[in-house]
Amino acid sequence: MLALAGTVALVQLWFLGHIVYWKHANPRSTSFMEARLEALQKKDRRAGLAHQWTGYSRISIHLKRAIIAAEDAKFIDHEGFDWEGIQRAIDKNQKRGKVVAGGSTITQQLAKNLFLSGERSLVRKGQEAIIAAMLEAVMDKRRIFEIYLNVVEWGENVFGAEAAARHYYGISAGQLGPEQAARLAAMLPRPRYYERNRHSQYLARYSGTILARMAQAQVP
């Protein structure tokens, strides 16, 4: 038991060490990006990811507001967990009889993308919560959001706001307008699916909903 406890503690220190380092240094890649690249290269050994880091101040305020409106309206106020959102997700899943909502905050999503696999288990969810708490303890909201915007998946091999803006609109992340930003935010739950189905009626409706909410979104 002592050996197991020691191993768990070392793993947590490894996570924490990376988070402290990334408070000021930009991650070159994430666990999720590496897994996606591996899957792509099984089909084509020459495959690569479209990813270009861009500073927070150079990302469109419209995209920031759209992401907050779509993914985590209470991002500014919570400490990594939206307990009301989690309860709503639980109720929705119970009503549907299957998992249709997750209730994860931007911080939790970043924790998963940075370090964890895509499997669903209580152990992985618990580790995600620990990493999310570390992120909130070490970084301010602006830094958490900056990293998130730069590593989130937006298509088959598209990661981060800069690559997404160039892939879908041929412009930089700083040039995105409100409608473009809302549409990119609407894609996030299923980015590879919506890349293939860009004319989805649901995507259009959801983009409109996000656009209407953006004025109230509080960004760090």
Image (tube, grey):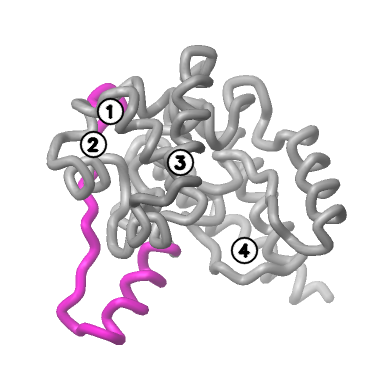
> In the image, residue 33 lies at what x, y percent?
37, 63
What SS does tag 3 mark?
A: helix
**Is residue 2 found left or right of 202 in the rendered image?**
right
User: Which sits earlier in the primary sequence, circle 2 or circle 1?
Assistant: 2
Residue type at mark 4: give it: Leu
Q: Earlier in the sequence, mark 4 or mark 2?
A: 4
Label 1 sits on what residue type?
Ile
Which of pointers 3 and 4 lies earlier in the amino acid sequence? 4
Which residue lies under the disc numbered 4?
10
Residue position marked by numbered label 2 in the rendering:
54
Verify CB contact (< 8 Å) between mark 2 and mark 1. yes
Which residue is under mark 1?
59
Determine which of the numbered discs, if any, sits on residue 186 in the image: 3
Residue 107 % position (x, y): 57, 40
Q: Is residue 103 left or right of residue 75?
A: right
Q: Is residue 202 above or below residue 66?
A: below
